[in-house]
Image: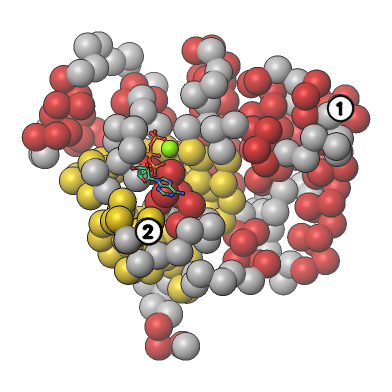
């Protein structure tokens, strides 16, 4: 097995990844990388394969070709508990990853306990207590005693982020985490995700329809079209000189972009 592991790139590396559903290829030979502390925006129209790629990265969908590596180590289809904890998914609908029968405190306690029992040392999230985890995402300790349904949409998405951080991941895949929120809650949650990601050295893959979001918080952007990655570039270069005609079409559809921070 050892020769398969090439510890060259830090962070997440997807190489030549293809995904088939019942013989139909929906993601074709995608190669992309996200370094610790950096945010890659994955854009592309509906049906282009973004969620499928996210699910392959988190190990929920098998690859037809290619590899997913974390710090050079191959992550296969069957992942160890440690590998599963290392790559976390924040979904569009925060209810999807929160047990409705458990309070937020119970959910976080359980994840932190399991993690602490099995972990072999390092931890990037500063403090492993539920209240501190909530503070990281801007929630007060009274949230610990509440159930997922007892929050606003934006608060619930923060809880989902805290839940994902509880396993001390190194990669966070966020699949349109704010599309159900209003503009101001969207901004708060995204800025939180971006700031936190940089602070604790997470590699973040942010799936979004919104190029203004990419412009505001991402370092790099990857453009998926019909399952094929047509362009991957630094955000500054992408917005100044998009190379692929499809990228130019996407950009032209955005009438006016807000100023980058
Ligand atoms: N479980 C599945 N079984 C069969 N086909 C699927 C499955 N999930 C997705 N697909 C198909 O794969 C293609 C890519 O879907 P995917 O959900 O990855 O797109 P997406 O880029 O996330 O779209 P959106 O922006 O609408 O979320 C689509 O044609 C979709 O119909
Ligand atoms: Mg999707």
Disc 1 and disc 2: Cα gap in Å? 42 Å
Question: What is the secondary structure assignment of the residue under circle 1?
Answer: loop
Name the residue carrying label 2: 22
Q: Cβ(mark 2) to ligand 1 < 8 Å? A: yes
Label located before the other in sequence (1 or 2): 2
Residue depicted at x 54% and y 33%: 92
Image location of residue 74, percent across then percent down: 46, 73
Kindly indicate whether the residue at mark 2 contacts the one at mark 1 (C-beta within 8 angstroms). Answer: no
- Picture quadrant where residue 104 is located: top right
Position of 43 relative to 202 (above/below): above
Near-viewer residue (127 or 177):
177
Name the residue carrying label 1: 146
Quadrant (top left/top right/bottom left/bottom right) for the C terminus: top left
Horizontally, residue 235 falls left or right of residue 189, namely left
Near-viewer residue (189 or 250):
250
Image location of residue 84, percent across then percent down: 62, 61
């Amino acid at each position: 097995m050892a020769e398969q592991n090439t510890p060259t790139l830090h962070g997440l590396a997807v190489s030549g990844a293809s995904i088939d559903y019942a013989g139909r290829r929906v993601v074709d030979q995608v190669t992309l990388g996200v370094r610790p502390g950096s945010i890659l925006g994955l854009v592309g129209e509906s049906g282009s394969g973004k969620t499928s790629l996210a699910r392959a990265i988190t190990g929920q969908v098998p690859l037809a070709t290619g590899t997913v590596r974390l710090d050079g180590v191959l992550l296969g289809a069957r992942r160890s508990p440690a590998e599963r904890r290392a790559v976390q998914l924040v979904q569009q609908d925060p209810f999807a990853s929160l047990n409705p029968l458990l309070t937020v405190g119970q959910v976080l306690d359980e994840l932190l306990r399991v993690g602490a029992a099995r972990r072999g040392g390092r931890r990037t999230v500063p403090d492993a207590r539920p209240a501190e985890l909530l503070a990281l995402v801007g929630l007060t300790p009274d949230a610990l005693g509440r159930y997922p349904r007892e929050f606003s949409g934006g608060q619930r998405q923060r809880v989902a982020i805290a839940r994902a951080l509880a396993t001390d991941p190194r990669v966070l895949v966020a699949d349109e985490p704010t599309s159900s929120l209003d503009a101001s809650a969207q901004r708060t949650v995204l800025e939180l995700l971006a700031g936190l990601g940089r602070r604790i050295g997470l590699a973040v893959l942010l799936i979004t329809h919104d190029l203004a979001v990419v412009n505001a918080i991402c370092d790099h952007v990857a453009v998926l079209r019909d399952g094929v990655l047509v362009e991957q570039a630094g955000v500054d270069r992408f917005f100044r000189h998009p190379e692929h005609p499809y990228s130019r079409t996407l950009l032209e559809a955005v009438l006016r972009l807000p100023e980058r921070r």
